[in-house]
Image (cartoon, grey):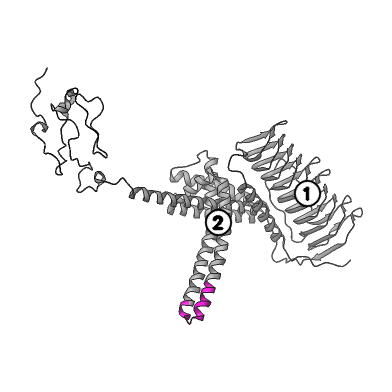
Amino acid sequence: MKPRNLPRSTPGTVLLRLALALALALTGLLLAAPAGGAAEVRGEDSVRVAAGEVVDDDMYVAAGEVVVDGTVRGDLVVAAGQVRINGTVEGDLLAAAQTVVIEGTVGDDARIAGQVLSLGERARVTGDLVSAGYSLQTRPGTVVGGDVLLGAYQALLAGGIDGDVTAGAGGLALAGEIGGEVEAEVGSRDEMRAAWAPATEVPVPQLEPGLTLTDGARLAGDLSYRSGTEASIAPGAEVAGNISYEQVAVDEAEPAGPTGPLALLLDGLRRFVTLLLAGLLALWLIPRAVAGAASVLRARPVLSLGWGALAIAGTAVAVLVVLFTAILLGIALGLLTLGGLAAAVVAGGVVLDVVLVLGLVLAIALLAPVVAGLTGGGLLLRDPAPAGFGRRVLALALGLLVYVLLRAVPYLGPVLALLVALLGVGALVVWAWDAARRARAHRGGRGAGPAGPMRGPQVGPGPAYPQTTAPAYPQVGGPESRAGSAPRPRPEPGPLPDGPPGTSSSHAGSTTARPPWATGGPGPEPGPDSRPDTRPDTRH
């Protein structure tokens, strides 16, 4: 039995690849959602697809609890506290929740992330299974038609898997039939520590660190694994291919995981204080940006997620383009014997790259959790848009506390951090774009206006009344006020209308031929009848 050269990757590297794959798959599906309303979107405390109910399109759900007893003809994308699939999802399943339980059928791939992931005896996944979380369990009777890619603190695979298994876990137990090869990177008893996780209603198996093959394990291909200790293989286990083991040295001076609840508490407290201070500073310096981004995230989460992925990827590409361009310009200027200018161009490109990278890091590490925390805290307080500074601080503190607690869950924390980064950065980008567009529209609207002498600039502090060149209303007692006279045509454009409809001679006493402020200008001089009548009214 000759050991093979396995890839030099760590459990953290495997988990990071899984988290990125899951997040990119989620982003791709959300961006591919039809804009014309060809998908069904639901958001409530509890969402249930009853038995016999059929959803003909893709379904997007954000709720506290999601139960599918019926049929979803398209894809199902869900973010919730608890997800249970008892019916059928004919397309892909993308689920992020504390607990995800599959007891029904998934017609294509299943990509799930959460604390506890469980596939029951009647679970059928036609395509691949991609999972990331604290615990994954496939019970006897489970059928996965494709490959399994997992990253977890522990995983128990007792069902049937037709394809290959690629795993990164602290503890991995194989107890079912696997039709392909198994490649795993697992922990060891010397380096693994007990991990804390919140209690759930779904039972969690207790597994030992390292790789274990029970009597029910049946592997049709090769078994390759890296660990600090050899696998525990029961006598009844069958491996048709070769078994390759690569021992990993364990550094006892630097334990791989937390040493106890106190270390977890201190780490969470440090993260909470850091984010809270950053949030308070942001609410003080840029309150409009933080509140506006939180409103965007609350109203348009799908758009924020997509723009977050594009912004992060675009910044990375921009950094490379700037650096490459600066180097090429430096080389060209050097060939032209402009060495001083070449050095300045290269230095400017490096400085611009540093600014881009620093801005992206600050946005991902600080601003994105602040925006997500303010949004989540406002929803928890049932005040989605807190107006006062005190209410915003309270919402921010509550949202960050929930975020820090969820970040402490092993293997779920990195996935949550990645999603929060995408959502927060995307919300900031969308808000900045909307703000710039409103500013351009405001400047354009302020400078535009109807041309002509009636809209000229006003001189002096007086009221902005239009200047007139002719009487605005008929003169009292003049020929224009007699019955049967032809109406005077309205000038185009005219200074003022000829008078409100229905004006009669009974109102003539209060009507002047020319306002006192309209002095100067061409036109006939007002006669004596056009002066205001100051005589006392003797009519009774």
Q: Using the image as rendered, state which of residue 56 and residue 415 is in the foreground.
A: 56
Quadrant placement of the N terminus? bottom right
Q: Residues within 10 Å of mark 2 (few under 14, many from 20)?
A: some
Most extreme residue toward the right is 235
The residue depicted at 14 percent of the width and 44 percent of the height is: 520
* Residue at the image point whose x is 74% and y is 61% from the top: 191
Query: Residue 207, position in %: x, y?
Result: 79, 51
| Disc 1 residue type (three-letter) | Gln
Nearest to the observer: residue 315 or residue 173: 315
Q: Percent from the top left, x then y, of residue 540?
A: 12, 17
Up-down: is 164 above or below 346? above
Q: Nearer the viewer, mark 1 or mark 2?
A: 2
Magenta stretch: dominant SS? Answer: helix
Q: Residue at x 48, y 50 (%)?
A: 431
Image quadrant assignment for residue 234: bottom right
Magenta extent: 326-341
Which of pointers 1 and 2 lies earlier in the amino acid sequence?
1
Q: Is residue 338 magenta?
A: yes
Q: Quadrant of residue 231?
A: bottom right
Observer able to see residue 19: yes
Q: Nearer the viewer, residue 480 or 504?
A: 480
Q: Could you tell me residue 314's position as x and y percent?
A: 56, 59
In the image, 104: left or right of 340? right
Q: Secondary structure at mark 1?
A: loop
Decide: is 312 above or below 386.
below
Residue corresponding to mark 1: 206
Seen from the viewer's position, the closer of residues 102 and 316 is 316
As drawn, the label of residue 311 is 2
Tag 2: residue type? Ala
Q: CA distance from mark 1 to mark 2?
A: 41 Å
